[in-house]
Every structure is written in C-alpha cells, then in structure tokens.
Image (tube, rainbow, N blue to C red):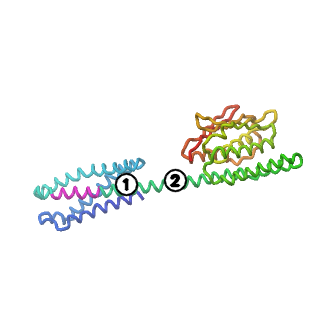
Amino acid sequence: MKNITPNIVFVLLGISLYTYFLYDPEPQVAPFVNDIETFLWFAFGATLFVIGGAIPNYLYRKKSILYQVISRGIGSIIVFIPLYYSLRYFMKQYFEPIFIFDISTKIIILFTVLLIAILVIEFLVIAYQEYSSQHIYVIQNKRKASELRLEALKDQLSPHYLFNSLNTVAYLVTSNANQAEKYIRSIAKTYQYVMRYANQPLISVQEEIQLVKAFAFQLKTRHGESVSIDIDNNVSLISGNIPPLSIQMLVENAVKHNVLSDKAPVYISIKYDEKEKSIIVSNNITKTPRKRSSTKVGLENIKERYALMNQNQITIHKLPEKYTVQLPLLSS
C-alpha cells in the first residue's frame, strides 16, 4: 500500500496539469481542448506515464537510490514516446502544423516538468525510507547489544558463581586465612569490573585481561592443579578492543565443558596472533561432564556481539583434542 499511494499522487498530479490547456486556448483548438474525450486521453496518458516508470522502479527496488530513480525516469520516457507520436498523428487530422507544433511543445514541457517532479519526490521518499530503516536498524542493534551484555552480566553474577565463590571462601577461612583474603579481593575485583564495563560495547584488551587474571586466580584456588591458565605477556601489551567478558567467558566455558582432574588437567592458553590481529584462546579437550549447568550464553553471546559490530567475526576450530576460538580485535 505504501508503494501504491505515491503513484496515485503522481497520477493525480499529472492529470491536474491538463488545466494548463484550459486557460485561454486558441479559438482553433478550444473545441479540441474542451472535449471530454481529449481530457480522458490525457488522463490515460498521464496514468501510463506514471505506471511506465513505476514498473522498473518496483523491479529494482533493492538497488541503490540512484539506480531506482534512473530506472523510473527511463521507464516513463519509454512510455511517453509512443504516446507522444500517437497524439501527433491524431492531431494531423484536425489542425494545421503550427497548432500541432504548439500543442506538442506544451505536452513535452508539461510531461518533462511532471517527470522531474516525480524523480525529485521519488528520490526524497526513498532516501527518507532508507534513512529511517537504517536508523531503526542501528537502534535495534544497540538494543540487542545491550541485551547481550546484560545476559553476559547475569551469567557472570549468577547464583551458581556466587555459590561456588562462597563455598571456596568458607573453606579458605578455616584453612588459609591469607589465601581467603586474596580470594575475596579477587571476587570484589571481578564484580567491580563487571559493573564498570557492563554498559560498554567494547573495552581494551588490557582491561579484559585484568578480569581474566582475577578469574584465573579464583579457578586456580578452587581447582588447584586441575586447571592451568597461561596468558602470554604480549597480550597485555597490545592495543585493541573486544566485547567485554569475551575472553573470560571462553575460559569459563573451557572449565565448564571439560572434566577437571589432576591426572588430566585442562590447559587454557591465551595468546596474541599479530598476523591475524586476534586473540587466540585455546584449550585441550578431556571428557565432557555428565551434568553441567549452562545458561546457554557463552559462545553464542560472543558470536552475536561480534556480528552486531559489522566487523571481523570470530573463528572456531574444533579438533578431537583441542578447541580454539579466535577473537579479532575491533575498532571502537
């Protein structure tokens, strides 16, 4: 319906141009101009003129604005040519060449004005529609990104995480007070980080690594030699951005989806690939736990947040004994 309405307006605009001929016509052409059949012919011609431009415009509506406007103009001109010459042929039966030339010239001028008006209006309408669509798309992406960050935040601050942390603290308080204090400070640092960066679409790699180190300390305290996290020194020195909690969620997934034991520990490696401008997070694969709690946020959350950035996407390599995720650095 929204595509039909402008064309109806264009038809009515074209038909209204007939009033130009009604204003003080030459005595020799007055009967012809005032005839209802002539008016109907003009109205029919104006309708075909608009439809002729609308058809290619409809066919190429997914093309660029310039392409759509040009195709509309060409379609209208193609329809106008046979209409114009049929009118001249018809007038030869009634008028002298001087009057035929006068009326033909006016017809060309009127339909040229009509075509220019249509193309200008069409350009403005399409441009506004694309601007509105793009604006809505940006708003939807921002909202989706906010929802994904909120999901990541909820996962990081989940009751399961808090329960494990409190259990570890309770054990350390009675067995190693100094370690308990460090563990509590690590949890506080994690919460401080999450609250500070939860509303930001991107953060620096250095800021993310600070959280990962705090989280690694908690995992090491909780699981001992069952998990090993190696962070390359170069990672902390690079300048680049990633979505918040990206590396942390991959580390957590590696622990969550593998059986941990001192005999078969999980090794997690975090490196920087200078050639690919990416952070490489990899881990060995042991056994899949029979029961594991999952909020189904992790990897899909990271994928979607990268997709919303309209930049490089993450790459996943899964081998029988190794799982690797490549996180490209993003521009702010």
Looking at the image, the residue that sits furthest to the front is 237
Q: Amino acid at mark 2?
A: Tyr
Looking at the image, the residue that sits furthest to the top is 320
Looking at the image, the residue that sits furthest to the bottom is 24
Rate crowding at label 1 as few (under 14), some (14 to 19) or many (20 or more) other CA atoms within 10 Å: some
- Residue 170 falls left or right of residue 231: right
Query: In whole angstroms, how far apart are the C-alphas of marks 1 and 2?
Result: 21 Å
Magenta-tinted stretch: 102-115
Rate crowding at label 2 as few (under 14), some (14 to 19) or many (20 or more) other CA atoms within 10 Å: few
Which one is in front, 311 or 217?
A: 217
Q: Position of residue 196 (x, y in %)?
A: 67, 54
Element at badge 1?
A: helix
Q: Residue at x 40, y 50 (%)?
A: 61
Q: Is residue 88 above or below residue 277?
A: below
Q: Amino acid at mark 1?
A: Phe
Q: Position of residue 87 (x, y in %)?
A: 19, 55
Q: Position of residue 37 (x, y in %)?
A: 21, 62
Prevailing secondary structure of the magenta residues: helix
Q: Which residue does the numbered mark 2 point to in the structure image?
A: 137
Q: Residue at x 22, y 57 (%)?
A: 109
Which one is in front, 194 or 123?
A: 194
The number of numbered discs placed on residues in the rendered structure image is: 2
Q: Residue at x 15, y 58 (%)?
A: 102
Q: Which mark is residue 14?
A: none
Q: Name the image quarter holding the N terminus.
A: bottom left
Q: Which residue does the numbered mark 1 point to in the structure image?
A: 123
Which one is in front, 198 or 150?
A: 198
Residue 292 lies in quadrant: top right
Which one is in front, 213 or 280?
A: 213
Q: Is residue 69 magenta?
A: no
- Residue 98 falls left or right of residue 161: left
Which mark is first along the chain, 2 or 1? 1
